[in-house]
Image (spheres, rainbow, N blue to C red):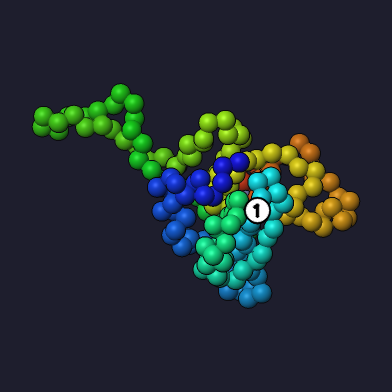
Amino acid sequence: MITLKELLRDPVYRKYFLTKPRLYGQYNDFPDFKPWALAIQKQPHGQWAYKDYHDFMEAFNKLKKYVPVLNDAAIISKATGCPPPRVNVAVEGKFFVRGKKKIQVTQREDWRVSLPMGEDARHRWCPFCRRPTVFTTFIYHPRFPSSKSNGMLLDPDMPRCTICGASENLVSTELKFLK
Ligand SMILES: [Zn+2]
């Protein structure tokens, strides 16, 4: 999976990641709820660890401190998804003429990651992890440790986000809602 450090080399994602996100839901009625989780992976292919935070900046500052020694990370918005950044993309072969100038026609689209050569093709935008992640199937997911201790298996046919465990169904519904 592409790592946060690799993602931050992309100027569009970098700007997105360094901007404090707006939360679409309000949690004032739930003072105990911590809407943010910092997910970190110390070693490539290693286990993910999670810690919840009330405040985005608290999670962000923690991550900033540890990012040089981590393999990968995400700041998860636990209850409310965030749409991907939007970019202007050239419409191939479409131009208009202003005076003597030929001007490329562009349209607004969701930003999409350019994956490094040989990278897993199953990346998609996770609105909760606020980044592209690999969606694949799990029987146990580290985000739901109790499922393992209860001996409960996750649906083996439903792809889930590698980092936050959100199912593809939930992610598709959330992204439609955010449109
Ligand atoms: Zn996710």
> Mark 1: is the Cβ under 8 angstroms from ligand 1?
no
**As displayed, is residue 59 above or below residue 171?**
below
Is 46 on the left or on the right of 3, as rendered? Answer: right
Residue at the top extreme, as displayed: 93
Number of marks present in the image shown: 1
Q: Which quadrant holds residue 103? A: top left
Q: Position of residue 82 (x, y in %)?
A: 52, 53
**As displayed, is residue 28 above or below residue 95?**
below
Viewer-closest of 69 and 83? 69
Question: Residue shown at 30%/23% (left/top)?
Answer: 93
Is 90 on the left or on the right of 137, as rendered? Answer: left
Question: Residue shown at 47%/49% (left/top)?
Answer: 8
Mark 1 neighbour class, 10 Å CA radius: few under 14, some 14 to 19, many 20 or more: some
Give the labeled residue for mark 1.
Answer: 41
Q: Position of residue 126 (x, y in %)?
A: 58, 47
Question: Residue shown at 14%/31% (left/top)?
Answer: 101
Q: Position of residue 124 (x, y in %)?
A: 57, 40
Does any portion of residue 83 appear in the rendered image?
Answer: yes
Does any portion of residue 176 appear in the rendered image?
Answer: no
**As displayed, is residue 167 above or below residue 74?**
above
**As displayed, is residue 175 above or below residue 91?**
below
Task: Determine the secondary structure under disc 1.
Answer: strand
Give the residue type at disc 1: Gln
